[in-house]
Image (spheres, rainbow, N blue to C red):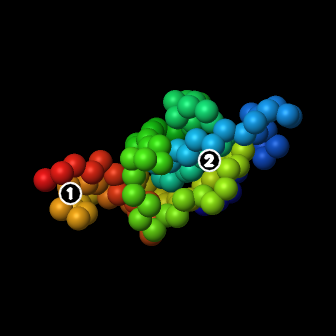
Amino acid sequence: MWKKFDSLMLAQNDTGIKKGENKMSNYYRITAYHKPTGISAILDSNGRFDAIWKFSAYLVAKGFKIIKVHSSDNFLVGNVDLLPTTSAKIHLRATADGEPLLEPDNYCGQACTSVIVGDKLYLTDLKPE
């Protein structure tokens, strides 16, 4: 399954950050589905993109359908920990065959959505009940 993603992502040295340029510290998480390969993924970026739409556009250009988009302040970690440091890389946090599951859930009295890819999940869309 990992080899399918290798061909979709740019080479590791293509960081999009020029020498001497400050790395950005924006944390984004995207859940996406790649129909040609039938694989869903949770991908994190902590510094590669200065705007969430740029991360989304990058994945769309690679053939992904964007399912959920988040910055670090609008999702709960679940069992997919946040990246500890900034990086110019995109981090593949989870993959699974088929589309991601989006299930209604409840967290501390708030309605929310569980986003599930394989054995990994996180919560989003928290709404007071």
- Name the quadrant containing residue 116: bottom left
Mark 2 = which residue? 46
From the top left corner, tell me how far across and down residue 61 is, in percent.
59, 30
Horizontal side of 47 relative to 114 (left or right) equals right
- Name the quadrant containing residue 114: bottom left
Q: Nearer the viewer, residue 77 or 6?
A: 77
From the top left corner, tell me how far across and down residue 16 is, in percent.
74, 34
Mark 1 = which residue? 110
Q: Nearer the viewer, residue 57 or 5?
A: 57
- SS state under label 2: strand
From the top left corner, tell me how far across and down residue 35 is, in percent.
48, 43
- Is 46 situated above or below 1? above
Q: Is residue 22 visible?
A: yes
Residue type (three-letter) at the residue carrying disc 1: Gln
Residue under the image location 27 percent in, 51 percent down: 126
Residue type (three-letter) at the residue carrying disc 2: Asn
